Every structure is written in structure tokens, then in C-alpha cells.
Amino acid sequence: MAAPKQGKPRPRPPVADVEPLRESDLAFALGNAASVMAAVVFDGRSLDSALDGVLRNVQMPGVRGAIRDLSYFGLRNWGRGELAVELMSGRPTLKPTELGCLLGLGLSLIWPGQTAKYPAHTVVNEVVRACSSRPGWVAAKGLVNACLRSFQREEAAVVAEVIRTVQGRWNLPEWWVNTVLHQHPDEGRQLLEQTGMHAPFVLRVNQRWGTPDDYVAELEKRGVVGYVEGPSAVWLPKGMSVHDLPGFAQGWVSVQDMAAQLAAPLMELKAGQRVLDACAAPGGKTGHLLECADIDLTALDISAARMARVQDNVDRIAPTLGTQWRYTAKVAPAQDLTAWWDGQPFDAVLADVPCTGSGVARRHPDIPWLRRPQDLTQLSRLQHTLLDALWSVVKPGGTLTLVTCSIFQEEGPLLATAFLEQHSDAQALPAPGLVYPMLDDQGHVHPASPDGFFYARFSKRP
């Protein structure tokens, strides 16, 4: 049988050259930030995990900072960025997903009405250069360039189209916005406004060392502006490295939001009490408990790596605490009492239970894009299980303080109500409840406004 005739091979289309980038190029930072964003939005990885994966290969500290900053910015503006990508490209999802995130990041950077990080022409040029740096992106260089330049020409119409949607108006998933507005008819818009803001840089002053006024005076000596914002809080309008904070290494201050600073004083601790800090990591509240009284404190968390961070916090403040305190660290699931509890009940328990983190989304802009409505149901089951277990280690006459960094009713008022209904020996004590935004004189969210938290407190009837 004769072999089939071979036709002339078809010429392959030319492959555009890939342009290598230096770390110092803005295009390098933009491309890597797009990779981080795609890992969060499309792969479901946390922002911290995605950043760790990218930054381990970057040598220059300034570039690492730029990638981190652009990643946070891109996720904080992904609600509009995603919609603008679809409008400009005509495709529901631009593939590969990293390329869509790169274009969304570029569009967000030149979006009108915000303080420009870079000149618009620089953003356009460097985003296109970033396309040229990877084989999977280079073929779309012309499309990305056309989308960015079309946006500049049609800016007003595109912006109007985007902000007509719920997602575009608030830069958040539609289900998230609708849930907040439904559950908080009076404060919902302020909560959504706060989510889109940069988180404030707030310090907790160690009362064993001095007062907030004392610390503001220390800052003034170094030309740094700080404001007293509560019994232990100092707000800095401009953030800075903890290594540059006076007395940080000596335990004078810790970085902690004002909402989180409510926990330890609320417990009204007394010297000699046996106290449990459940779900303790990363340890901000743990340190505050030790600063408030000479207690016998047990810190518990499921993660050994996270408990190491708690230990670091305790070690840093330890020289300020004197000699009448005790600290024990244990790694185990809080609900598995046989793995960690010695049978001796506690005078006070702090139950900072896992939650969606909806109240701290401005600090973690990945949260709205990682969470789904069904997460509320799944986490609610875990929260009830943990509270049941922790209630059993509270001595008669003792107290349990419930904390969540959430603004969702299921993880706040509804959780506390269900707990009371299920435990006839529990009595509600005064507590802040939901912590709402602090407003300025014009009725807008104050830059130092506390995170969204929920607090409830219960005593066990003898």
C-alpha cells in the first residue's frame, strides 16, 4: 500500500519575543501583583499565602514592598476592576486569569477620583511591558494596550456603567453588600464605606509602662505625630515600621486595633485568677491580658506555628510584667478537652472564635473574595461547638467572653442568643455588642475608626 502523500508543512505563526524584566521595573511588580491577585480570586488562596509564594523569589526589599502594596490595592479595587475588564475586553473572563488580574489592576490604577500611585501613561506602558514578559501573556499585549487606551478615551461612560452595579458601587461582591445592608439597615453604608478604606495604624500602650499621653510625648521627641484615642490606644495617621517605634522591642507598645483592645479590660481580671485565652494566635489579646493583671494564663491554639507568634509577643512584653504572673502555651483543638485540659476550671475564658473575618476586611482585602454565603453556616457550627466545649471549663461563678471580628449577625447577636438558649446556667453580662464605625464631625467614617467586632459576655450561675 502506497504511503500517503505528505503535504507541505503549514508555517507556524510567529511567536512574539518575550522581554525579560529587571526587578526594579514597575512592570515586574505589576506582573507579580497580578499573580498574587489571581491566586486569591481564582485559586482561593489567602493573600498572605499568595504573597509568600511570590515574594520568596524577589530579592530587593523595595520591590517586595511594591508588590505587596499593589496586591492589596488590586484586591481592594477588584470589584470595579473585574467589571471593567469584562466591559473593555468583551470577555466574561480574560484568560489566563493572571492576565485578567493584570488588566484589572491597570484599570484600577488609572481609575478616576483617587490619589494616583503612578502617572496614567506610566501605568499603561508598564502593564503592556508586563504582558511582554511572560509567554502566556505576550500574545495579548495588543488587546491589553487597546483596552487601557480605550478606557482613557471612554472613561466617563465606563465608570458610569460599572458603578450602576452593586459590586461596582461598593467594590465588593454583591452578596456581601446585600447581606450587610439587610442586617444593618442604619449603619450598613458606613460599614461598607469602612471596608474600602485603609486600616488605621493603632498602638496599644502597655499600662505597666505608662499612659497613652506618655507615649505620645515619646513620639513627639522623635518628630512623630500621634493621637490618644482611648484608655490605652494611640493612633498614628501615618504608619511606620515597628522597629522604628520607640520602646516597641522593650514592650512599651503593641500594634492592635481599638476594637481588639476592648477584650482584656472587659474581662475585669484580678490578680491570681486562672484564665484561658482560647484561639489565642497571633497573641495581641494574650499580651493585653498579661498587662492587665498578674494572672495564671493558659494560651491555646490549634496551630504550633501560630502559637510561636504568641510566644514572641509574650517574650517581648515579659520584662514589663514583674514576677507574679504565669504563662502556659498549649497546641490543640479547643473542642478536644482531653488533648489539653487538666480538669482544673478557669475563672475567666476568652473565646475569640474563628469567623469569616468580615469586620477586618479592610485589613485583609482578600476576605470578601474568598468567602461564600455558605461559609456562615459552616463556621456557625464550629463556633457553637467551641463555645459548648469552652463553657464546660468555666468554673461556677466564672465568666466567658465571646469575641468575633465579624459584622455578620450569625457570628454576633444570633450566636450569643443561641448560646443563652442552649445553656440554662448562662447569664448575660453587659458587653459592647457590635462595634460600629466611629464617625468624624461630617458624619463620615473616621480614619481611626475601630474594626468591626462583636462582644458578648456570660457568667456561669453557681
Image (cartoon, rainbow, N blue to C red):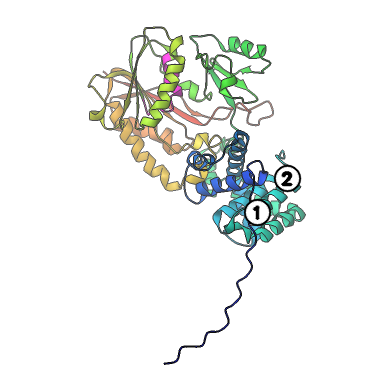
Q: Give the range drawn in magenta.
A: 278-290
Judge whether residue 165 can be spotted in this image.
Answer: no
Q: Quadrant of residue 343?
A: top left
Name the residue tied to disc 2. 112
**Image position, residue 314 (x, y; %):** 42, 18
The residue at the point 38 percent across, 10 percent down is: 294
In the rendered image of this protein, does residue 63 appear above or below residue 373? above
**Image position, residue 447 (x, y; %):** 63, 28
Name the residue tied to disc 1. 19
Q: Is residue 285 magenta?
A: yes
User: What amino acid type is highlighted by mark number 2?
Assistant: Pro
Judged left or right of residue 175, residue 268 is: left
**Image position, residue 402 (x, y; %):** 39, 27
Q: In which quarter of the image is the C terminus?
A: top left
Q: Quadrant of the N terminus?
A: bottom left
Q: Real-space Cα distance between discs 2 and 1?
A: 30 Å
